[in-house]
Image (cartoon, rainbow, N blue to C red):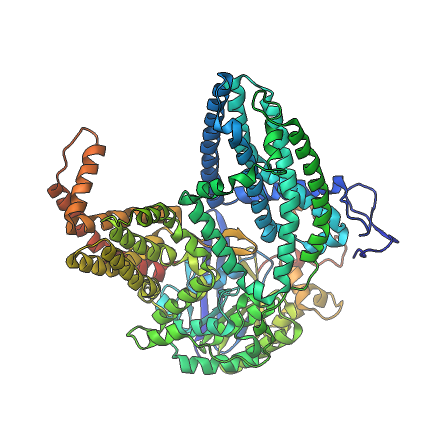
């Protein structure tokens, strides 16, 4: 079995007294798609920033593509990263922005332009590539960001909400692209709120809540362990899993009374990580 | 959506606790609705101004300026009042006040027109307001809000003068006329300026050519305004049009302002005329504001012709990129340099921070033009400014200026050194030759020797490059990431105040050091200045100044490579 593409052991990030990520451990095989789910503020982006060397872990260690996250120069050769906020300059055209990304990676202009043209065409953006990004819609801007993350054909790609703001056709293009990357041995670490995306694409799904990994497994395994499935009330889905393992944002005083009926399941009250060994 | 010009068959509840307003057959705003809209608009404006340290600082500087002008106004008024009480004739109370009030009105009209043409003449959340309220109500709110925002400025200039008159002449009732004239000036200027501005806005929006030219025209007008104000030509312009300013109906404002000051010969008929004409102007202007607003707001904006091109894009031309491709620079350095220059050219607002010292050059430029003499220090000032502009415009905040692309930069293999070199190339490539050419040209005009010209030319290039590196080191040590809201959905990330201060000080000391080391006159001047200004009455000789200059240069020289190492290391290791 090949070495995992992403390994984290006890990864922790504290901001003052606040723990954004707490004791996170995971191991992602090369060439797979890892779907990273969690409520807003759970620690998804912080985790990704640690894995891409943009944030320094308070504790723990991690390696991406065999390179420790403390070794930025070596790691940046191997990863592509799309932040939730697309990394673009409004003053540039789409093509100029992508050429900028290519130059940062040392790709010669002729080779870069070939790749840019191919990818822009793939994302149906070629006709708008000579317009300034300030005139782009949210979806178009996101597409530029996605192309920028994969332009240099990295071994590991980390995508933070890649389909948010995209229309169904563009979202399908991104999903197809993710599947194609994975089939070509690229490892994809994908954070999303769109559960069907994770359900369709991810080989493994991890759910983070309040900085802790609270559930992990293949989509089918998680769905089988959801409360609805266990209760025999139908097939489980990722939404049920998500609801089961993550906390409500409401304060305890405002929370609805707990269901004390015989059908309530004790697993509802626990947030232990339901790790399924592969 | 409300219907236009039809008998109201359905009404829209304004949601403000008032009876449902009719749809748009009328032109008069509902006063209560207009007042509520104005209240919210003014509150938002105040919160915006207080929300960012740059605007707070700007407000404090502006307040200091108005306080100074208010003091001048008070002093003039008090002197005139005393002269009036002594039975003497004063310029202010014989013709000056009429001129001043006319100028204030014209100024207010100009500023309000610009306000309406700019972003303040737009509606935030227009989809909401125009589907809930009628256009006259919304326009009424806009007019009231603008009048409210400009009234304090006018009061700050006019009231101190009349307080001075009241105190000097013992005429407290003078303030009554001042108050009425201020309100009428603001109301009538708003009623004229806003419809005019909205009409201009509508014209620009309907024309692709005017839309493209708008930033250029706006910039030219702004520069002209600053040159006129800072060169002192404003009084010349006023003196030329003074005969017109005193004639009715504009001149009646002076009669109204001084109507309650006895002994100055203010015409009661003129005061009454001001009230009547002013009232008519206010009503007519308010009525015209509604169609003007519709003309501006209810239009599809003209798109530039390039948007009609449906063909696939091709790789951009990128002449600077090709030029640098022929030079021995790495791809990442080339990428940073090209992108930085493209951004500066296409979004020149960040150059505002580098352009501020130019205001001080306007009086010097005027002096050169009028006397025909170029001061000996002028070339060095050009070198100083070129170095300042190169550093402040581009490399003084290399991390913060990346904005949303910072993660992409940091997660790329580009080394810190490549990023720093990219910023230095972007700054020095256009600025170094321009600074050298300008400094040498100014030196030629000043009849400087060939040696001096060579020194200033070489120094210009060296100092610009060195300043760019220094700025990068200072900027990465004191970065700023918060964007400055410039209004109209524009943002810029300026360098931090600490970076500005440290860079300006270091640069000034270095340029002065170069000047005293290379020029006898500079040594003597600095020696004389230090002797005069230092405490304990020391005598500072030119030789001591030259020695100090060499010391500064010896300290400055290693600071440049140190700044480079600092910047490169901080960029490579930056983590949040």
Q: Position of residue A140 (x, y in %)?
A: 58, 70
Tell me the residue at 39%/75% (across/down): B319
User: Does residue A90 appear to the left or right of B451 in the view shown?
Assistant: right
Residue B17 occupies quadrant: top right
Tell me the residue at 37%/66% (across/down): A72
Tell me the residue at 63%/76% (across/down): A172
Count the marks: 0
The one nearer the camera, A209 or A124, is A124
User: Does residue A43 appear to the left or right of B20 in the view shown?
Assistant: left
Tell me the residue at 51%/42% (across/down): B241
> Dividing the image into 4 quarters, which one contains the C terminus of chain A?
bottom right
Relative to B57, is B267 above or below?
A: above
Residue B234 occupies quadrant: top left
> Would residue B88 be visible to someone looking at this image?
yes
Relative to B282, is B564 above or below?
A: below
In this view, the residue farthest toward the left is B543
Q: Position of residue B279 (x, y in %)?
A: 70, 37
Q: Position of residue B390 (x, y in %)?
A: 33, 58
Relative to B171, is B189 above or below?
A: below
User: Does residue B30 appear to the left or right of B208 in the view shown?
Assistant: right
> Dividing the image into 4 quarters, which one contains the N terminus of chain A?
bottom left
The one nearer the camera, A247 or B164, is B164
Q: Position of residue B495 (x, y in %)?
A: 40, 52
The one nearer the camera, B182 or A100, is B182
> Would residue B576 be visible to someone looking at this image?
no
């Amino acid at each position: 079995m090949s070495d995992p593409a992403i390994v984290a052991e006890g990864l922790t990030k504290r901001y003052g007294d606040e723990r954004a990520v707490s004791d996170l451990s995971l191991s992602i095989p090369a060439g797979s798609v890892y779907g990273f789910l969690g409520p807003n503020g759970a620690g998804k982006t912080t985790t990704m920033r640690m894995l891409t060397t943009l944030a320094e872990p308070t504790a723990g260690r991690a390696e991406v593509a065999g390179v420790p996250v403390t070794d930025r120069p070596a790691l940046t050769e191997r990863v592509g990263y799309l932040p939730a906020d697309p990394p673009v300059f409004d003053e540039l055209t789409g093509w100029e922005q992508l050429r900028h990304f290519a130059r940062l990676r040392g790709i010669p202009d002729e080779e870069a332009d070939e790749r840019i043209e191919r990818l822009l065409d793939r994302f149906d953006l070629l006709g708008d590539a000579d317009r300034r990004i300030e005139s782009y819609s949210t979806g178009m801007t996101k597409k530029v960001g996605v192309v920028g993350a994969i332009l240099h054909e990295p071994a590991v790609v980390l995508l933070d909400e890649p389909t948010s703001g995209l229309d169904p056709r563009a979202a399908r293009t991104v999903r197809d692209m993710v599947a194609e990357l994975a089939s070509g041995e690229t490892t994809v670490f994908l954070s999303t709120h769109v559960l069907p995306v994770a359900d369709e694409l991810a080989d493994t799904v991890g759910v983070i809540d309040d900085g802790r990994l609270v559930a992990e497994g293949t989509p089918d395994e998680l769905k089988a362990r959801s409360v609805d499935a266990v209760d025999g009330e139908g097939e489980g889905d990722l939404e049920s899993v998500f609801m089961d393992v993550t906390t409500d944002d409401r304060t305890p005083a405002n929370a609805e009374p707990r269901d004390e009926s015989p059908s309530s399941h004790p697993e509802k009250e626990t947030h232990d990580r339901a790790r399924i060994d592969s | 959506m409300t219907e236009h010009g039809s008998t109201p068959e359905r009404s829209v509840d304004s949601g403000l606790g008032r009876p449902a307003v009719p749809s748009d057959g009328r032109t008069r705003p509902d006063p209560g609705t207009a007042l509520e809209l104005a209240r919210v608009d003014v509150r938002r404006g105040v919160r915006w101004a207080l929300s960012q340290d740059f605007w707070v600082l700007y407000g404090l500087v502006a307040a200091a300026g108005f306080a100074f002008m208010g003091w001048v106004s008070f002093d003039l008024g008090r002197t005139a009042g005393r002269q009036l009480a002594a039975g003497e004739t004063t310029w202010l109370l014989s013709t000056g006040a009429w001129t001043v009030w006319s100028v204030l009105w014209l100024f207010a009209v100009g500023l309000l027109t610009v306000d309406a043409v700019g972003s303040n003449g737009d509606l935030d959340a227009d989809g909401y307001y125009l589907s809930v309220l009628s256009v006259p109500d919304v326009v009424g709110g806009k007019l009231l809000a603008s009048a409210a925002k400009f009234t304090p400025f006018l009061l700050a200039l006019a009231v101190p003068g009349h307080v001075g008159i009241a105190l000097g002449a013992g005429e407290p009732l003078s303030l009554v006329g001042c108050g009425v004239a201020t309100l009428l000036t603001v109301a009538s200027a708003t009623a004229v300026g806003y419809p005019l501005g909205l009409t201009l806005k509508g014209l620009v929006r309907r024309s692709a050519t005017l839309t493209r030219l708008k930033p250029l025209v706006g910039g030219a007008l702004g520069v002209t305004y600053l040159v006129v104000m800072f060169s002192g030509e404003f009084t010349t312009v006023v003196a030329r049009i003074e005969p017109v300013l005193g004639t009715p109906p504009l001149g009646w404002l002076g009669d109204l302002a001084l109507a309650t000051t006895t002994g100055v010969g203010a015409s009661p008929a003129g005061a009454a005329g001001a009230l009547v004409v002013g009232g008519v102007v206010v009503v007519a202007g308010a009525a015209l504001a509604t169609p003007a607003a519709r003309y501006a707001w209810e239009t599809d904006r003209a798109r530039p012709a390039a948007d009609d091109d449906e063909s696939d894009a091709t790789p951009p031309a990128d002449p600077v990129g090709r030029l640098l491709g022929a030079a021995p620079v790495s791809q990442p350095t080339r990428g940073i340099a090209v992108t930085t220059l493209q951004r500066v050219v296409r979004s020149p607002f960040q150059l505002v921070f580098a352009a501020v010292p130019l205001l001080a050059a306007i009086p010097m430029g005027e002096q050169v033009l009028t006397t025909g003499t170029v001061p000996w220090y002028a070339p060095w000032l050009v070198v100083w400014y070129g170095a300042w502009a190169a550093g402040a415009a581009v490399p003084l905040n290399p991390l913060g200026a990346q904005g949303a692309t910072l993660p992409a930069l940091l997660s790329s293999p580009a080394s810190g050194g490549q990023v720093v070199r990219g910023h230095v190339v972007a700054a020095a490539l256009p600025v170094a030759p321009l600074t050298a050419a300008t400094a040498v040209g100014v030196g030629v005009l000043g009849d400087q020797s060939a040696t001096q010209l060579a020194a200033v030319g070489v120094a210009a290039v060296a100092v610009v490059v060195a300043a760019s590196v220094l700025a990068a080191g200072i900027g990465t040590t004191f970065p700023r990431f918060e964007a400055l809201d410039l209004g109209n959905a524009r943002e810029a990330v300026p360098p931090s105040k600490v970076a500005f201060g440290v860079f300006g000080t270091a640069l000034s000391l270095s340029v002065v050091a170069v000047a005293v080391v290379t020029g006898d006159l500079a040594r003597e001047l600095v020696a004389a200045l230090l002797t005069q200004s230092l405490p304990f009455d020391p005598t500072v000789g030119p030789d001591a100044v030259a020695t100090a200059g060499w010391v500064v240069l010896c300290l400055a020289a290693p600071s440049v490579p140190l700044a480079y190492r600092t910047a490169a290391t901080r960029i490579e290791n930056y983590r949040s």
